[in-house]
């Protein structure tokens, strides 16, 4: 649809000075997915600085039938922020932290606030905002909420959904819903905020949120353990969880091949052990108490695991710098994969009790299709979310390897669903996984989603082509 000059002029006026971009070369970054998988188009990028401006822009689009792609940091991996015509409403100028209530343990932040800045603001007020993920230096909280982001601390604090108490949302007709309530208990009908969390901007535009804060961690210990198989790592997780309960913040699994790729491609990284092992577990414990002696208890627990032959080796970080080095191994796996060559990636989850069985059977599937493929299966063992990635066999042509993408992915996702798992654990649906959604979700679930979409956005102008849009 071509947008008339009159409508474009009204949109520019509503966005205000310095609030719009229409030069093609300047629009380009707003139309690209960060990995280059998707390249969209739009006629105008507006960057409003207030919720009132967002409301006015949406009203103009609703009247003119102009499609809208809401966008925050544009760091998503599923193409959910890539426009398909119309305009982009980028929220990066709405970046104010409106309030921090230390006694209520809440923060009210606008959608364009960078996640790392929110973490820092919480810490400056003696609090913790626990959402943490690789893109936290550039992703924005509106996008985190719209995709229900996960990250490394889900084990203790839950997904983003569990960290949001209230929302401010501009609806598809331009009305503003002010649900910015910092209440732990509010039993007054439907919990409307949950409709918009994880909806990827298809039902409205999140412009601000009341976030749940926690006591800042005053004691923290990090360790890495090594063993022979996911089954052993799962046994170690069970033992650590039983001993430490809520003090267990993160438990990540990393295969040897991932450590090797990181050491090969990422400067100043190395295997923390003199001997290599098939699998590694990265463990983090934390406490809000100064005098919590986590180190001694963790060393004792790992020692017992060594004695019981659950693991083969372990190291506990003796400084914050060493802890950061251990985390750097985990956090740079995706970058190392990219530098190594072609890869086929899956963001899946299964019940924690089935992770080891999934990795074994999925590995057999992959080797049956492409012998010698390298299984870079890493991620959040503690909550069952595994990034089941496959790197090309050494020496194989990348294009030839990628020809197997559909065959491998179909079989792997069929296995995931058969084990009671999810084909999208924390990255969302966006453009990329719409076919999987319609294939794996029950018809009644798709119908309910379509009903909600049609009720809130009957003209279907909000983020077209994402999630259930175009499924009928």
Image (cartoon, rainbow, N blue to C red):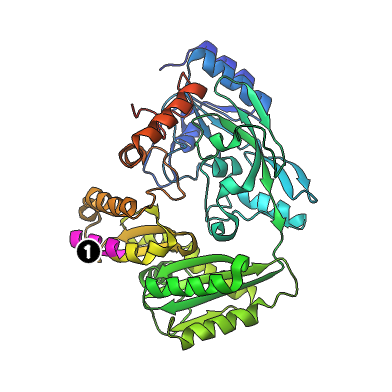
Spot the residue most to the bottom: 307
Question: Is the N terminus in the top left, top right, bottom left or bottom right quadrant?
Answer: top left
Viewer-nearest residue: 243 or 335? 243
Circle 1 — which element? helix
Which residue position is annotated with label 1? 367
Q: Residue at x 58, y 56 (%)?
A: 132
Viewer-nearest residue: 221 or 248? 248
> The magenta stretch spans which residues?
361-375
Q: Image height check: is 464 above or below 138? A: above
Q: Is residue 311 left or right of residue 211?
A: left
Q: Position of residue 126 (x, y in %)?
A: 77, 58
Question: Is the C terminus in the top left, top right, bottom left or bottom right quadrant?
Answer: top left
Q: Image height check: is 142 above or below 232? A: above
Q: Main secondary structure of the magenta part?
A: helix
Q: Is residue 102 left or right of residue 253?
A: right
Q: Position of residue 134 (x, y in %)?
A: 52, 56
Q: Residue at x 71, y 37 (%)?
A: 181
Q: Position of residue 295 (x, y in %)?
A: 64, 79
């Amino acid at each position: 649809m071509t947008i008339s000059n009159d409508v474009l002029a009204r949109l520019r006026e509503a966005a205000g000075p310095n609030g719009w971009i229409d030069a093609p070369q300047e629009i380009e970054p707003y139309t690209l997915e960060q990995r280059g998988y998707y390249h969209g188009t739009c006629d105008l990028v507006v960057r409003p600085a207030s919720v009132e401006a967002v409301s006015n822009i949406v009203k103009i689009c609703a009247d003119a039938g102009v499609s809208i792609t809401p966008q925050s940091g544009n760091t998503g991996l599923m193409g959910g922020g890539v426009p398909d015509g119309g305009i982009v409403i980028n929220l990066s100028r709405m970046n104010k932290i409106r309030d921090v209530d230390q006694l209520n343990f809440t923060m009210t932040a606008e959608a364009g606030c960078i996640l790392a800045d929110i973490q820092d603001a919480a810490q400056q007020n003696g609090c913790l905002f626990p959402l943490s993920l690789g893109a936290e230096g550039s992703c924005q909280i509106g996008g985190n909420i719209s995709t229900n982001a996960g990250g490394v601390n889900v084990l203790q604090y839950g997904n983003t959904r569990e960290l949001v108490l209230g929302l401010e949302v501009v609806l598809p007709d331009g009305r503003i819903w002010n649900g910015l309530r910092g209440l732990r208990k509010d039993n007054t009908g439907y919990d409307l905020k949950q409709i918009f969390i994880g909806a990827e901007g298809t039902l409205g535009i999140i412009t601000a949120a009341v976030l749940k804060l926690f006591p800042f961690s005053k004691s923290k210990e990090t360790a890495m353990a090594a063993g022979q198989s996911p089954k052993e790592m799962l046994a170690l997780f069970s033992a650590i969880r039983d001993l430490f309960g809520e003090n267990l913040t993160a438990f990540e699994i990393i295969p040897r091949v991932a450590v090797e790729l990181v050491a090969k491609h990422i400067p100043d990284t190395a295997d923390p052990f003199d001997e290599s092992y098939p699998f590694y577990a990265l463990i983090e414990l934390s406490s809000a108490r100064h005098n919590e002696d986590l180190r001694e208890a963790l060393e004792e627990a790992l020692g017992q695991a060594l004695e019981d032959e659950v693991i083969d080796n372990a190291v506990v970080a003796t400084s914050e710098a060493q802890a950061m080095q251990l985390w750097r191994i985990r956090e740079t796996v995706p970058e190392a994969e990219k530098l190594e060559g072609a890869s086929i990636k899956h963001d899946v989850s299964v019940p924690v009790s089935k992770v080891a069985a999934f990795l074994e059977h999925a590995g057999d599937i992959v080797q049956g299709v492409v012998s010698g493929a390298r299984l870079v299966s890493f991620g959040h063992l503690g909550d069952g979310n595994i990034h089941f990635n496959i790197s090309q066999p050494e020496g194989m042509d990348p294009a030839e390897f990628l020809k197997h993408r559909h065959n491998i992915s179909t079989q792997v996702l069929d296995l995931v669903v058969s084990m009671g798992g999810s084909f999208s654990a924390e990255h969302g649906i966006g453009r990329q996984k719409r076919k999987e959604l319609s294939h794996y979700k029950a018809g009644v679930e798709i119908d309910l989603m379509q009903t909600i979409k049609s009720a809130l956005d009957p003209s279907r102008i909000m983020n077209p082509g994402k999630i259930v849009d175009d499924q009928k």
